[in-house]
Image (cartoon, rainbow, N blue to C red):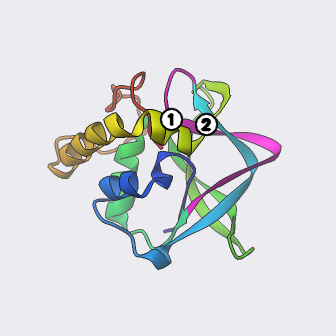
Amino acid sequence: MRLFFFGTLMDPEVREIVMGRALPADAIETGVAQGFRRVFVAGRHYPMLLPHASGWVEGTLVSGLDAETVHRLQVYEGWEYALHPIQVRTGSGQTVMAHVFLCPPHIEPDRREWRLDQWQLRHKRPFLRKARALMERASRGSLPAATGQRPRPALAPRTIGKK
């Protein structure tokens, strides 16, 4: 499976924690999703994509993901996101289909643009500790499977960011 990451999962350290392994270099490339803009989820430190006719969002395109890795990603993303297919333009200019985690309409956006470099400076260090704990619980099977229903957020949503 091919996925497009536009938030915290663009960070290699976060990606490795969540996926439980580093990806080979040939499975990762830059990509651009057209028709979107990246903003904060209201009251959170992580982003969401909003439809925007003339917008575009640069992100990370990963290929060759197995079912177990996709499940880990779904646990990480939680109830606020679901996978949807989109077209992504690769760094070489090719257009490919990929899946992206999008928020449902009832998730409130903030108007502010979200930027990875700012998140890394302000929120990454405390976030990594919580992400490791979440994924360790998921590996032990002490978290329910991602169901698309709204459980209590796994990562303190008003104090930590993700994506």
**Where residue 4 appears, x then y in whole percent?**
57, 58
* Residue sitting at x 63%, y 30%: 105
Answer whether residue 32 is magenta in the image: no
In depth, the one of 149 and 12 nearer the eye is: 12
**Where residue 9 appears, x then y in whole percent?**
46, 51
* Residue sitting at x 59%, y 31%: 40
Query: What span is in magenta?
Result: 42-60
Determine whether, in the image, residue 58 is placed left or right of residue 142.
Answer: right
What amino acid type should be assigned to the residue bearing mark 2? Trp
Answer whether residue 47 is magenta in the image: yes
Q: Is residue 74 above or below residue 127?
A: below
- Work out which residue is located at the far right of the displayed protein and give it: 54
Secondary element at image label 2: loop
* Residue sitting at x 35%, y 28%: 151
**Where residue 110 appears, x then y in whole percent?**
64, 24
**Where residue 121 appears, x then y in whole percent?**
47, 38
Mark 2 — residue?
A: 114
What amino acid type should be assigned to the residue bearing mark 1? Tyr
Q: Quadrant for residue 143, please give it.
A: top left
Determine whether, in the image, residue 23 is placed left or right of residue 52.
Answer: left
